[in-house]
Structures are given as C-alpha cells and as structure tokens.
Image (tube, grey):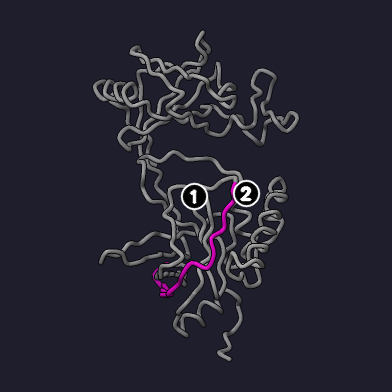
Amino acid sequence: MAEETELTQIERELVLQYLRDDNVPLTVTLEDKPEMSDADIVDDKTIGTSDESRVPASAIFPVAIPSRQIEVLNQGIILLKNASRTVNPFAGRMVRVQFYFHHLGLYFVTEMKECSQGLAIVVPRVIKRIPDVVSRINYDFTGELSYEVSNSRVAIDCLPLSGYRIFSAPKWDEIDISCQKEAKALIEQFVQNVKTGQSAPVGNGLHLISCARFLTEKRMVVQESVEGRIKPFNMIYMDDKRLVLACLEGTEALDSSMNYTLSLTFTLSENRLLKRKLEIECSVENCFENERMPQIRCYSLKFDQIKEEDLRFLYERLTGKMFDIK
C-alpha cells in the first residue's frame, strides 16, 4: 500500500473552498469498527462488545451522504441536513469522512457531533490522500478482454476473484446462508427468463450458482484513490464453453452486439517462467443482475472461436481428462 500523504495548509484551504462551493457528496464510516468475530449480536441488528459500544450492524458499512444534505460553513463545519437514519448511529463517534477533490480521493478523521441543527462534523487540521492499494498477488491464471473501437484497441484486465473456485463446479453451500433465499429466487428468475426467451440458453446452468452468489453477497465498499478509473473484471466461473465475469460499480459495461477477444494466460510451473497463452473470440451470452443492486452484474461470455489445441488444453486443464476430438 502506498504511503498516506498529508495535505499542506494551502492545499487544505483549497479543499475547504471546494467543499463550500461545490457541495461534494461524502462517504462516512466508523473509524474504529467492532470486530465481527468478537462482537455480540443483539436481535440480529446490533453489534458490539458492551452496551456502550453497541451499534447497528449496518453502521460498520460506509454510508453515502448526497450533496443536497450537506452544508459547509466558513468555519470548516459540515452540517448534515435531514440525514437518513443510517447516519444517526455515528453520532458521538469517530468517523472517517471520504470524498473526491477533482477526482483525487481524500479523507479525514473527526468526531460526528449532535447540534441544534442536527448532525455536524468539523474538518480537522489534517486531511490526507487516500493511498493506492497495490496488489501483490501472483496469479496462476489471468485474463485480458479486448475489443476494437474507433481504430484503437481497448483492453481490460480480468483477475480471479478470491474465494471462487473458477475451474470447479460451484456448490450451493458456498453461498452464505443468510443470502441463500435471495440467491435461490435469482436463479429461478434467470431460468424463467430462459424459458420465456428473454435470455439465451444457460447449458447445465452451473454458472448460475456463482452468479447468484456474487450478486447477493455482502461486501465492503472501498474508496478509490482516484475517481473514475476503470476497474478490472473478476473471473468467477469457467468451463470449456464460457467464462463468467463479475463486475462491480466502475467496471466497464459490455455490449451484447460486440465481438471480444479473450486472452488467457496460465502459469505452468512453480518458477512462473513457463506459461501458456490462449486467444479466444467471444461474445456476451447473458447478463445477470440483481434489481436490489443494479450497479453490479455478471456477464457470461460464450466462446465463439477457439483453436483446437487451445480447446484441448483448456478442456484438460478444467476436467483433468484427456480431450477426445470426437
């Protein structure tokens, strides 16, 4: 992780002016979150290790405050007007406030206080840049999805998503028990869409389990150091006919009418020097979404054209069986 950088006094004044003039939306979260493994659960709604520290479980997740609910005073005080009930549990606690200044991610830590006009936070002396998170994972398997547009080539990384066994048949119990009811309803909807002709066929449908898992699981929202950067796709399932890509907010949308080139690179030895690269022509087979969280989705990419030797390698890699051309 890159080192955090504190703004100079002049930079801080520019940021305060920007906050006053532009009414920037903010994201607020608890600075000291209760450890979920150690916390008591009270009526499935509250967490905490003591009566004093108990907060609603939702308070451990970031809360977005729209600009219309924010007023920044000259003294560097931010008033939260008509704040939603999800913000109220932060009152009297140290919070981390994050926002973008000309697409640059910034944050500060301060106490959220109650006042006659509602809730307020005082911008402290120290404002810091959100550091870049540098991934140091050495993947045995990576991908790149590319396409041509306006005589130029656009390429987006595709990385395995941690916790998903991409080359194995997904299991139902890999879905968190608290999400299984919603996941079952999603799969039923996906199958119904196929029956009514709204979606393309899904083959044996195994990949629907991985899609439903991704579309229902709870995840923390991570503030980026720079706003607007295209995020990589996550690979969550693969067989010899398709690859499923999972997308969070900020990942580029795929077009069902376009043709894409999928480059897959496999590391074949422990010294990581021996690699095998596959080139596959593909297109969007289906797009799966959850209406409750429309900002995330899963794309099933069908393999339209693949060399025989690449298909043989892929099949044997996935199944552990010899490929029979017949």
Q: Residue at x 30, y 26 (%)?
A: 7
Establish if 275 lies above or below 212: below
| Disc on the earlier residue, 2 or 1 | 2
**Label number found at residue 223:** none
Callout 2: SS: helix
Q: Quadrant of the C terminus?
A: bottom right
Name of the residue lying farthest toward the top: 116
Quarter location, residue 60: top right
User: In the rendered structure, which segment of residues is drawn in magenta?
Assistant: 272-291
Q: Inspect the image, locate mark 1, and give the three-letter code of the amino acid beneath it.
A: Leu
Image spot of residue 247 (x, y percent): 49, 54
Towards the viewer: 140 or 270: 140
Give residue 168's position: percent from left, percent from top: 62, 67
Residue farthest front in this picture: 196
Quarter residue 276 falls in: bottom left
Nearest the viewer among 208 and 313 is: 208
Horizontal and vertical percent for residue 151? 25, 66
Residue beneath disc 1: 248
Three-letter amino acid code at disc 2?
Thr
Res 145 quadrant in image: bottom left
Q: Residues within 10 Å of mark 1 (few under 14, many from 20)?
A: some
Q: Residue at x 36, y 41 (%)?
A: 227
Residue corresponding to mark 2: 216
Instruction: Relative to 260, say whether 310 is above or below.
Output: below
Query: As drawn, is 273 to the left or to the right of 239?
Result: left
Q: Are marks 2 and 1 in contact (CB under 8 Å)?
A: no
Image position of 34 (left or right of 83): right
Question: Which element type, helix, strand or loop, lies under badge 1?
Answer: loop
